[in-house]
């Protein structure tokens, strides 16, 4: 079969790209290795920047987001047992919306199904061929039939562990990699949020984050060593650790409840440059990873595919290759800003087991400065709510 754009991966990047192209009358086929059920249940990001919310609303997939998303106008930095509120909206005029990534994925899949757009789940053996000359994707479909998809261009939206990035010969790209000496244990619990806003906590025992998904569901994260296994973390141990880290001088009432899901995610920073080779364009986690502390990963994926859709429209409808040629440079400016912000939030808030007391004092000073200086708080806030798209 043939299409204009072959899209590898049905995460936020692949699905949104496909939908943006459909709106411009460009044909695309999305191929995904997992099942629909699996991608709709995968618990991941929760914070949507204002530009992300505006884009989803503008293209008509924001109804449930407007209904069920939770707008937030501030967040708390908690350290030394005290909260310091960063007034996001007062400082920037903008806000964020807490709405699960898998809800966005569900909304986009529903929009595809409603419009009858080609989206294949449970494919296997995905291989990209001749991406610099005559791009094709070979794969096995859900029924076990060998298939080949010819396309004008390929969008690699298959995440960090996908096959798209490795399809670029190593000598054509530069990789930037940074690992952190910790991981996040994420917990989804059936219990009302214990606070109306997100709480980013720095504690001697390590970082902790209080977030939410709905008035009934709380999302929590704990810094743990990268070598930790989830079997070592009983629900009791998780609640006890959260209690100890989230404690305040005036007392904090952490509402406990049944744990619905728990898992451990390693933390890394990663960028590949350029995000393009021949007719293959990378977007989202396939091209870059940020540690989750800045809540930027999904939002970067959205910003990438907004640029990519425009570049493909110019290329495939008007025969103009300029935007496709500058796609990588345009994305990388936002990517590196998010890389820095995510590294800064991570460094400021976690307890680095290898750091000396001097470094720890610097960390506390940075936290106090951010909490008390309007200039420092504004800098955090404008990055957090999301810089405007270019
Ligand atoms: P993915 O969502 O990874 O989608 C890639 C898709 O490709 C997957 O469905 C995968 O199954 C599929 N695939 C893989 N290999 C193949 C193949 N060979 N062929 C076909 N398909 C394939 N970001 C934020 O913005 N805010 C947050 O608050 C936030 N919190 C996070 C918390 C956690 C615990 C984690 C793990 C991540 C968080 N992120 C956050 C990051 C965010 O989830 C990712 O950046 C986002 O999922 C990137 O979207 P994507 O579409 O690029 O990649
Ligand atoms: C959530 C995840 C993040 O990485 C973050 O910084 C804030 C909130 C969440 O899943 O709710």
Image (tube, rainbow, N blue to C red):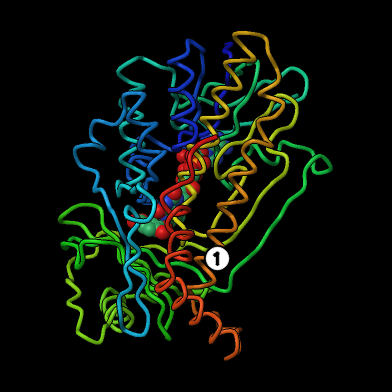
Residue 32 position in % (x across, y down): 48, 32
Image quadrant for the C terminus?
top right
Above or below, 115 against 273 in this view is above
Observer-nearest residue: 345 or 217?
A: 345
Above or below, 327 against 87 in this view is above
Above or below, 60 against 92 in this view is above
Give the SS element for disc 1.
helix
Which residue corresponds to the image point at 58% horizontal and 44% vertical from the top-left?
334
Which residue corresponds to the image point at 45% horizontal and 53% vertical from the top-left?
382
Residue 335 position in % (x across, y down): 60, 46
Residue 114 position in % (x across, y down): 30, 18
Occupied quadrant, residue 237? bottom left
Residue at the far bottom: name it: 357
Above or below, 84 against 100 in this view is below
Which residue corresponds to the image point at 62% horizontal and 43% vertical from the top-left?
287
Residue at the far front: name it: 374
Query: Left or right: where does residue 194 sit relative to residue 130?
Result: left
Occupied quadrant, residue 78? bottom left
Observer-nearest residue: 90 or 2?
A: 90
Residue 213 position in % (x across, y down): 25, 53
Residue at the far right: name it: 171
Query: Left or right: where does residue 375 sit relative to residue 316?
Result: left
Image quadrant for the N terminus?
top right
Which residue corresponds to the image point at 47% horizontal and 62% vertical from the top-left?
265
Label 1: how many residues lie within 10 Å, few (<14), some (14-19) or many (20+)? some
Occupied quadrant, residue 246? bottom left
Q: Which residue is mark 1?
A: 344
How many numbered discs? 1
Observer-nearest residue: 56 or 254?
A: 56
């Amino acid at each position: 079969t043939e299409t204009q754009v072959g899209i590898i991966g049905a995460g936020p990047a692949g699905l949104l790209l496909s939908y943006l192209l459909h709106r411009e009358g460009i044909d695309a086929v999305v191929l995904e290795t997992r099942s629909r059920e699996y991608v709709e249940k995968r618990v991941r990001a929760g914070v949507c920047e204002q530009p992300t919310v505006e884009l989803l609303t503008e293209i008509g997939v924001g109804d449930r987001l407007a209904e069920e998303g939770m707008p937030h106008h501030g967040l708390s930095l908690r350290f030394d047992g005290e909260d310091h509120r960063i007034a996001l909206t007062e400082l920037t005029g903008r806000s964020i919306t807490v709405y699960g990534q898998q809800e966005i994925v569900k909304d986009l899949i529903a929009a595809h199904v409603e419009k009858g757009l080609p989206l294949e789940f449970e494919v296997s053996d995905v291989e990209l061929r001749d991406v610099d000359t005559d791009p094709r994707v070979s794969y096995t479909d859900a029924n076990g039939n060998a298939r080949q998809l010819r396309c004008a261009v390929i969008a690699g939206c298959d995440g960090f562990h996908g096959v798209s990035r490795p399809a670029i010969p190593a000598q054509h790209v530069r990789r930037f990699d940074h690992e952190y000496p910790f991981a996040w244990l994420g917990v989804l619990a059936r219990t009302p949020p214990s606070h109306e806003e997100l709480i980013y906590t720095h504690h001697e025992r390590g970082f902790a984050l209080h977030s939410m998904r709905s008035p009934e569901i709380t999302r929590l994260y704990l810094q743990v060593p990268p070598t930790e296994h989830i079997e070592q973390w009983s629900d009791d141990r998780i609640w006890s650790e959260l209690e100890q880290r989230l404690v305040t001088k005036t007392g904090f009432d952490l509402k406990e409840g049944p744990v619905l899901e728990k898992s451990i995610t390693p933390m890394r920073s990663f960028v590949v440059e350029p995000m393009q080779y021949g007719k293959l364009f990378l977007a989202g986690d396939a091209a870059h990873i940020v540690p989750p502390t800045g809540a930027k990963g999904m939002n970067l994926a959205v910003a990438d595919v907004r640029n990519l859709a425009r570049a493909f429209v110019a290329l495939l409808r008007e025969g103009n290759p300029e935007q496709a040629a500058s796609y990588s440079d345009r994305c990388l400016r936002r990517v590196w800003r998010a890389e820095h912000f995510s590294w800064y939030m991570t460094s400021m808030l976690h307890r680095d087991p290898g750091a000396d007391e001097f470094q720890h004092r610097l960390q506390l000073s940075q936290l106090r400065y951010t909490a008390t200086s309007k200039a420092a708080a504004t800098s955090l806030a404008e990055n957090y709510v999301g810089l405007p798209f270019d």
